[in-house]
Amino acid sequence: MKNTKITKQLEDVLINFRQTMTTSLLKEALGSGLTLPHFEVIVHIAHSGEVTMKDISSWLHITPPSASVLIDTLVKKNLVSRVQSDKDRRTVHIVLNKESHKLIQSIHQKKMSMFKKMLSKINDEDKESLVRILNKCVSN
């Protein structure tokens, strides 16, 4: 019984933590004039390096024309570029522009600042315990 209660409390805390982070970072992205799908595409490209329109449409579960409209908006905002593949002229890659890298860096700095602020509320002993516990969780 107690184990179930603690597990539920842990789930609630982790969900709350994630929602707090996501909400704050989304506000940052929206403040720069992006919609959530635009922001998600930029982050996806940042993690992937370069993607095709087909990759974007399948990743977002939208039609290729819808993906094209989404990318057109990012191109107009100078956040991404369409680059023809060196290996196959028919393939066009979507790559991040300098402004997207700046945006991602800014959001990353904001995220790190939030982590530091949250962690400043606990003492060193609790921080060590948290590190130990999280390492156990991700060590698979």
Image: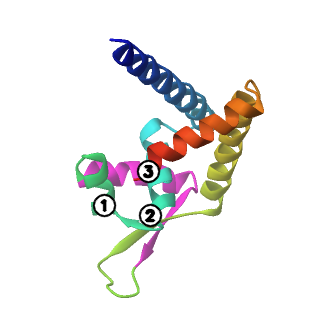
Q: The disc labelled 1 sits on which kind of residue?
A: Asp
Camera-side residue of 56 and 47 = 47
Q: Nearer the viewer, mark 1 or mark 2?
A: 2
- Residue 54 horizontal side relative to residue 14, left or right: left
According to the image, label 1 marks what residue?
Answer: 55
> Quick one: SS at disc 1?
helix
Residue drawn at 59 percent across, 63 percent down: 97
Q: Is residue 74 magenta?
A: yes
Cα–Cα gap, marks 3 and 2: 10 Å
Asked if the residue under mark 2 is in contact with the one under mark 1, i.e. CB atoms within 8 Å, the reply is yes
- Quadrant the N terminus occupies: top left
Please state the extent of the stretch shown in magenta in the rendering: 64-84
Question: Is residue 16 placed above or below 108 in the rendered structure?
Answer: above
Q: Nearer the viewer, mark 3 or mark 2?
A: 2
Camera-side residue of 63 and 58 = 58
> Quick one: SS at disc 2?
helix
Residue at the outermost bottom position: 87
